[in-house]
Amino acid sequence: MSTHREVAASGSSTVEKAGEDPSSAPENRGRGRDLATIPPVDIFEDPHQLTVLADMPGVSKDSLNVQADRNSLLIEGEIAFDMPQGMSALYADLQNTKYRRSFVLSGELDTERISATLKDGLLTVRIPKRIEFRTRKIKVDVT
Amino acid sequence: MFEGLFNFDTDSLFDEFRRLESQMDQLFGQSPWPAGIRSVQRGTFPPLNVGATPERVDVYLFAANLDPKTLDLSIQQNLLSVSGSRRVEAENDKAEYYRRERFDGDFRRVLALPEDVDPERVTAKYRDGILHITIPRHESARPRQITVN
């Protein structure tokens, strides 16, 4: 269960709304349906921006929530798919109905201009760096 | 709405054991009692859920950004196997990676379905990163209402 704690630890106060989140109610702890799955991510940086790729299959545009403030990024989404009436589970690797993960951002990132795209369950979030923080090549003149 | 597919009936003692087994598996890597012969370690790509109704069996594979052309689905009697590949392309050589958690490579998952499925009428579709395979059960195996004259 340590993986779930990781999210709570790295989340800012805007992410973990203790009173509203049903998973924080003691009687619901440990029940699969109230916990969120942590989506696997790739994170890389180039001179202009930081990119986060997250696998979130089952999430559609309507159920996706990408939120950023000055120092945190939250990605979450509800998992939805066609399911016949009265279905019972024979086997389930995925036992949660949502994904959630958050990251702490640093000051050089321009959170006003974050962009996000979702395609076939793959979420791409691009966080540009503030212009003054972009890496510049310094040309050395040899005299 | 997900009750059925995401939660085992925890009132049953057997399911409690199964839950315990998966927790033990997570903690120690191996459970002290025998696991299913085709069971896989946690975190195997892609995760899958299987749900059943009296009419059909539904298999959901959670695999984002898949090229459906790489998929190979086959079914023999009641043994379903799905293989394919998911490549993570580096979009920029200069990029510096901090995390690489997403699956990259070939995968294969095999699962035994209930005995009464009809392998002739399997359908599959890919949407929002979920591969949904539907396998109807044989008509003769479905529960029937018997009228008493």
Image (spheres, rainbow, N blue to C red):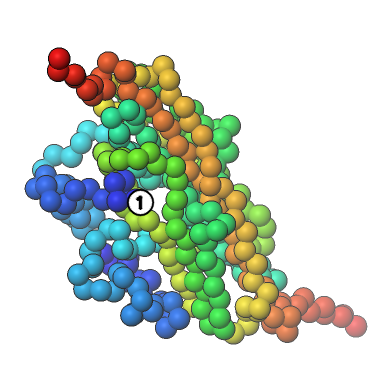
User: Looking at the image, which residue is at 23% across and 21% down?
Assistant: B144
> Dot 1 lies on which element?
loop
Total labels drawn: 1
Residue drawn 15% across and 14% down? B149
The percent coordinates of residue B112 (x first, y second) are 29, 29
The residue under the point 42% across, 60% down is A99
The answer to which of A139 and A19 lies nearer the viewer is A19
Q: Amino acid at mark 1?
A: Met
The relative height of residue B84 versus residue B9 in the rendered view (above or below) is: above
Figure check: B93 above or below A111: above
**Residue shown at 70% from the left, 71% from the top:** A48
To which residue does mark 1 refer?
B1
Tell me the subunit letter for badge 1: B
Quadrant of image for the C terminus of chain A: bottom right
Judge left or right: residue A122 versus residue B9. Answer: right
Q: Residues within 10 Å of mark 1 (few under 14, many from 20)?
A: few
Q: Is residue B102 shown to the viewer in this render?
A: no
Residue A87 is situated, as x and y percent measured from the top left of the image, at 31, 40
Quadrant containing the N terminus of chain A in the rendered view: bottom left
